[in-house]
Image (tube, helix red, strand yellow):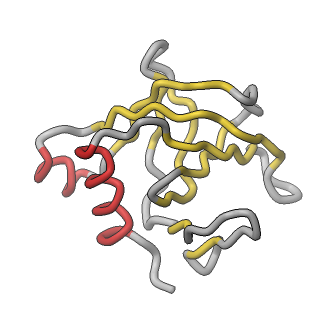
Amino acid sequence: MAEGLVLNEQRNLVRRELIYYLKVTDRHTGQELGRMGDVHAEGMLVFTPEPLATPTVYKLFLELPKAMAKEEGYAELPIQAESLWSRPGPKASNYYENGFRFLDLPSQAQKAIRRLTEIFAMPG
């Protein structure tokens, strides 16, 4: 992930690491679930302090960077996603990596995610 691009042999899309680790919040509880590590049109990686149950469908809010939120007129993007896997982070880290697949993203959410990757992706 350090290079900004993440490839996986089972994935056809390139995931983009952003310059921000955006907050991911559970819409039902209002609690922060974790931080987004990278994203592509079909899913995202979320860092959490504890492993997540899989497969589980979550209704989430994805925080938008302040500059984008001002343009869009809202600070959080409502999304629904399914957790597909959960594993410990790299050695000596204190977090878990969780893979999510987006479910039924409305066109507004698709556009916002595309803009996130175009504007805020790490170079590389």
Question: Which residue sits at x=40%, y=34%?
Answer: 79
Looking at the figure, which quarter contains the N terminus? bottom right
Q: Where is residue 29 in the image (x, y as percent from the top left)?
A: 48, 13
In this rendering, the answer to whether 108 lies above or below 83 is below
Tell me which corner region of the image, top left, top right, bottom left or bottom right, holds residue 7.
Answer: bottom right
Question: Which residue sits at x=45%, y=57%?
Answer: 41
Question: Which residue sits at x=51%, y=68%?
Answer: 16
Image-based side of 77 in relation to 54, left or right? left
Image-based side of 8 in relation to 36, left or right? right
- Count the labels in the image: 0
In this rendering, the answer to whether 124 lies above or below 76 is below
Which residue is at the far right? 91
Which one is in front, 110 or 89? 110
Which one is in front, 89 or 118? 118
Image-based side of 35 in relation to 83, left or right? left
In this rendering, the answer to whether 41 lies above or below 98 is below
Which residue is at the far bottom? 124
Tell me which corner region of the image, top left, top right, bottom left or bottom right, holds residue 49.
Answer: top right
Q: Position of residue 51 (x, y in %)?
A: 77, 33
Q: Position of residue 20 (x, y in %)?
A: 43, 59
Question: Which residue sits at x=46%, y=13%?
Answer: 28
Q: Where is residue 70 in the image (x, y as percent from the top left)?
A: 13, 49
Image-based side of 50 in relation to 1, left or right? right
